[in-house]
Image: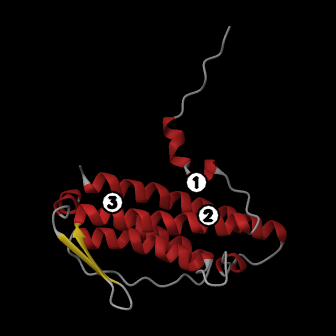
Amino acid sequence: MSVYAITIPCFAQMLRSLTTLLIKGEERAQALGFDPQHLLDARLAPDMHTLARQVEFTCTQAQEAVCRLTQQALPRLATPANMRQAKALIEDTLAMLASADRAAVDAGAERQVSITLAGGLSFDMTGLEYALNWATPQFYFHLVTAYNILRHNGVPLGKAEYVQHMFAYARQPELLV
C-alpha cells in the first residue's frame, strides 16, 4: 500500500474543494452585504474552533503528514486573518503537497512516528498507521467542520462542492431512443 497514494492526492483534491467552499462563502457574504470575516469568525458551538482555525488545522494535517513521513521539521502555520490569507494558506499547502517526494513519503510507512499532545499524551505508531489512523481522520474532521460552519451560516453548499473531484469520473446517462 502506498502511503503517498492514500494521503497526498486525496489531501490535494479536498483542499481544492475547501477553496471552492470558501469562495462560495465569500460570494454569499457579499450577496447578503456582510463582511466575509464574519464567516471566518463563525463556529458551530462556543467550545469549538472558528472557521479560520478549521482551515488552519486542515492545512496543518496535510503539511504535517508530509513532514512526519519524510522526517522534516514540522511547520508552524498561522491562523488566517481574512479570506485572502485562508485561500493563500491552502495554495501554499497545495504547493507543498505537489513538491512532496513520493518515494520519501512511501519510505516513511515503516518509520516510527510519535505525536505528543498538549498535556503530554503521546501516540507511537508506524508511518502507515499514522497516515491511516491520525493524519487522514484529522484532516477530514477539520475539513468537514469547515464545510458545516459554512452551511450553518447559510452558504448554499452541497456534495457537488465537497466532492467536486468526482466529476472527472462522471459519465452521462445513455439516452433511450
Q: Quadrant of residue 172?
A: top right
How far across and how far down the image is residue 128, in percent?
25, 61
How far across and how far down the image is residue 146, in percent?
59, 68
Q: Earlier in the sequence, mark 2 or mark 1?
A: 2
* Most foreground residue, 108 or 172: 108
**What's the mark number on residue 132?**
3
Amino acid marked by disc 2: Tyr
**What's the mark number on residue 147?**
2
* Most foreground residue, 123 or 72: 123
Left or right placement of residue 73 versus residue 81 in this view? left
Amino acid marked by disc 1: Tyr
Q: Quadrant of residue 17?
A: bottom right
How far across and how far down the image is residue 84, in percent?
59, 75
Residue at the farthest front position: 121
Amino acid marked by disc 3: Leu
> Label 1 to label 3, Cα distance in Å?
21 Å
Q: Are marks 2 and 3 in contact (CB under 8 Å)?
A: no
Q: Is residue 59 above or below residue 9?
A: below
How far across and how far down the image is residue 111, in percent?
16, 68
Q: How many marks?
A: 3
Q: Are marks 2 and 1 in contact (CB under 8 Å)?
A: yes
Q: Which residue is mark 1?
A: 162
